[in-house]
Each structure stands twice: as C-alpha cells, then as structure tokens.
Image: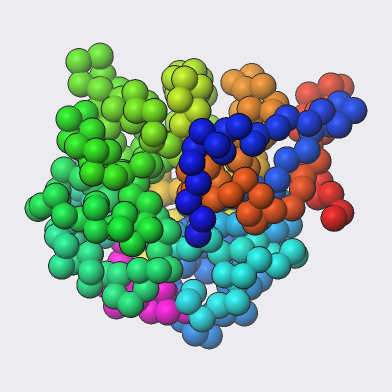
Amino acid sequence: MEQIDLERYAATQQIIDCQGDWLSPGGIDLQINGGLGLAFPDLTPADLPKLESIATYLWQQGIDGFCPTIVTTAVEKIQQSLAVIAASSLRDWQPGRAQILGVHLEGPFLNPAKRGAHPKDYLLPLTLGNVQQVLGDYADLVSIMTLAPEIAESAEVIPYLRDRGIVVSLGHSLATAAEANQAFDQGATMVTHAFNAMPSLHHRKPGLLGAALAHSNVQSGFIADGQHVCPTMLQLLLRSGRLSQGLFLVSDALAPIGLPDGVYPWDSRQITVTNGTARLPDGTLSGTTLPLLVGVENLVRWGLCELHEAIALATTSPRQALGLAPDAPHSMLQWHWDEMSASLSWQRVAQ
C-alpha cells in the first residue's frame, strides 16, 4: 500500500464541475462489518463466494474499495477470518466488484467501559504479546487496528503496528487528551467513529475527540445516519474538521446491509434492524445497514456541507486517511443534484 505525503495529496485534488453535475472517484468504506447477512468475523472457507457477492453488491452501491471490519471475538475466529480474506481474489482491483483494501481489526483491545456492542468476554489486555498473537501471520493483511490507548501496558504497541504499515485508530476508549496526544506522538493517525464509544466533548476535558480535532495529522471517521450522531453535533464536527481536513465518512454497516429490516443473528446474540438502524435486545446501538453514500446524501440534505465537500468525505478523504494514492482503486461517479426534489443521486461513469 503506497504511503503518500499529505501536502502533496492535497495539491493533487481537483473539483470538476460537469455542467451542473460533479465527478468523483468511487467511495471507500474503511469500516464495514459484513453484508448480505454474512458478518466478517464469521467467515469460513465456504463463504468465499458470498464474500465475492458482497463485493459486487458494494460496487453497485458506488464503493471502489473497503476494509472488512472484524469486531471483537475469539482470537481463533479472528485468525480464521483473516485466513479466508487472505485467500480471496478480492485483494486485486477489478471493476465490477469492490476491492478489499486490507482488514480493519476493531478490537479486541478496547476499554471495557466503552466496548459498546463488543462482547466483554473476548476483550484482551493491550500488550505486545497479545497483539502479535492476534495478528499471527497476517500482519500484512491488516490495514487498520482500532484500540484504546489508555489500556496499553507499554509504549511498544503503536510503534510496532506502524512499523508493519498498520494504521492505528483510537476508539472505544476513555483516553484523556493527554493520553490521546501521547498515542498520536507514538504514531496513531486515526479515530474510529467520532463521538461514539468515547466521552463527549467537554470544555474542561477535551478527551480523545478534542485532541484529535486539534491535531493536524489525525483523521476521524464518522457515521452520518442520523442515529449515531445528531446533525447538530455533526455540524460542529464538520466545522472543526475543516480546519485540518481531518474527517471522512464510514458506514459502520452490519451484516444485514443489503437485506430488509428484521431480526438477525449477531455473534451469539440478535440484532433488530428498524429503518436501517441495528440495536441489541437491550437497546444498545450496534450499527446501521445503510450504504456509505447515503451518508453523503444526508449531509447535503441536512444542509451541513456543500455538495463537493460531502462527496469528498466518502471518496477522497478516506483514501487520504488510509494513505492511498488519490486514484487507487479508481472508478468514476457522476453526482446530480435535483433542485426540484432537493435530492442527490449518483451513477457510475463508463470508462
């Protein structure tokens, strides 16, 4: 995966007005937990055809590339899922299906107090030995690891991950601003789903998110489904993020994406999906089933972004956050804003 200089990256960006429409690269989803009923932590060799179907579905949703996200589960299951993804042909770019850009490990090194829907029984202490055990022989397959920096037992872990080309994202955390800044100094460059599973912004305790927004080299993912973060707080986030251009959209979509609302299995539990929002039986918000580009439409519909800004948050910004070249992987989307219906739509451009 090519690492790029962020200033050089910014200088390459262009906004092209196509007779009232807009052109952009395809979407990049750095946090998606499954699709068409299959959760990525449950992958087995028999699921390779289903994995390819998910990639085809995501392509149809405007996605060029994605990071299959494996949430907290048993180490043996993580290893099995990594092995299946390693055997997949989806790691190579091919139009007609979204490319796997590496795995996002969201856990198991999370703060139990901010684990959200992650099962407590499989959380692990953040030690170098545990990290090495989870990665096993698949460190080169992992692109992102979400962890809570305040539970680290030494300062070795983040530099170890960065040396292996893994983007370190802070999340599911109670980190103070000082603890977050220490992690950024060690090499962390990302924050997982801003506002969610972390303390709220406070005028005396800025915490993880406050530290991230004040840091020029940190990108924060966020969910724009209207449930994870209310539009007013997204407006504040976007105004702050414009100072550093440090934001990008994620879907955080769960396995039922592509399926109708209903009740679905989720690890050993069940989730209920209503209007695209998934919750555990106790009401805990566990994710969404809305595609990434719905977030772009929401940001424009809510009046939070200029059209080109919203598009960039799902296309060029996540490429920047992952250190990808602006055109890799690359297809073109044409976006149209309909004044009469005040609606945004897109279609793929033949190349």
Question: Residue, x 15% and y 67% (percent of image)?
Answer: 129
**Quick check: 291 left or right of 21?**
left
User: Where on the picture, by quarter, is residue 212?
Assistant: top left
**Quick check: 257 left or right of 5?**
right
**Quick check: 334 left or right of 256?**
right
Residue 252 visible to the viewer: no
Question: Residue, x 41% and y 40% (percent of image)?
Answer: 193
Membership of 21 in magenta stretch: no
> Does 193 appear above or below 273?
above
Question: Residue, x 41% and y 74% (percent of image)?
Answer: 82
Residue at the right extreme of this rendering? 19
> Does 290 appear above or below 6?
below
Q: Where residue 187 sits in the image (x, y, percent)?
A: 29, 45
Which of 101 and 193 lies nearest the eye of the viewer? 101
Which of 28 and 232 lies nearest the eye of the viewer? 28
Q: Where residue 224 sits in the image (x, y, percent)?
A: 54, 35
Residue at the top extreme of this rendering? 203
User: Where on the picture, by quarter, is residue 92?
Assistant: bottom right
Q: Where residue 284 sits in the image (x, y, percent)?
A: 35, 45
